[in-house]
Image (cartoon, rainbow, N blue to C red):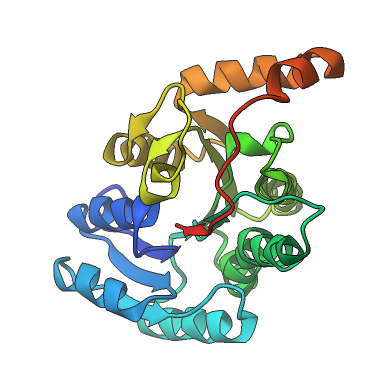
Amino acid sequence: MTAHTPPTIFLTGASTGIGEAFARLYAGRGAQLGLVARRAELLDKLAAGLTPTPVVYAVDVTDAAALKAAAADFMARFGVPDIVIANAGVSVGTLTGIDDDLAVFRQVFDTNVLGMVHTFHPFVEPMKAAGRGTLVGIASVAGFRGIPGGGAYSASKSACITYCESLRVELKQSGVSVVTICPGYIRTPMTAVNKFKMPFLIGVDDAVQRFARAIDAKTSFTVIPWTMGLAARVLRVLPNWLYDALFQRMPRKPRKESSG
């Protein structure tokens, strides 16, 4: 990809929220998109309003075989993509002591962590062979410390951060870049269910513009907005007794699934 050639981009979690905003932003740049999400009707509606027309794949990222087939189809049409964005994720409140939440823990990990692995897997070897490409993992500041009532989400995003770091080092000499983006609170359907104050909340279009700049620069790790990054770094170094005292009474995320 040169400065004047529109990129080819494969994007998961494309139907709503951050994914939809990514699709609109990159379509505006003339990118050829491969859009992945579970809900075909939302994908088709989104694609109908974008030029050039994206290729859409109604696939759940927990289905490794289906995602691999979608990736193969995209590469057969357009070659090895310039950018792959693993954005699909679910956020939901969980409590370890509740029977029904055991299945929810599995769903969150399958989607947020294994879904990211499934997304990157088909492209790693082709990108290495081409000596280029950028793999983008959308994690979260929630992965910096364990959030009470959100153990599955926090743990899954912590795993995403660590996984992307491992992958980045593995691919260091290959010409393939790995970018980890940790959003703070972004105004999307996923955060709309939160009934508590969300510090440093920013709009999704603003957020995605910032994400794209980090991707363009191949920034290895970034927190957006930077104000949330500062706050998160402070939280990371708080001693446990102080963190526990501050967060044990914080409002909990509802125990009802929200997809993004």
Rendered view: 15 above or below 172: below
**Where 213 falls versus 40 (above or below)?**
above
At horizontal 42% and vertical 72% (from top left) the residue drawn is 36
The answer to which image quadrant residue 146 occupies is top right
Query: Whole-percent x and y of residue 112?
Result: 62, 59
For the N terminus, the quadrant is bottom left
Q: Residue at x 85, y 15 (%)?
A: 241
Q: Going by the image, does 30 lie left or right of 33?
A: left
**At x 52% / y 22%, what residue is drawn?**
228
Residue 103 in percent (x, y) is at 72, 68
- Quick check: 13 left or right of 232? left
224 lies left or right of 160: left
Q: Position of residue 94 (x, y in %)?
A: 68, 51
Quarter in which the C terminus is drawn: bottom left
**Which residue is at the front of the view, 161 or 148?**
148
Q: Which quadrant of the structure image shows residue 107?
A: bottom right
Pick the residue in front: 108 or 234: 108
Tally of numbered discs: 0
Residue at point 31%, 78% (across, down): 55
Above or below residue 227? Residue 180 is below
What percent of the width, then of the height, locates residue 232? 62, 22
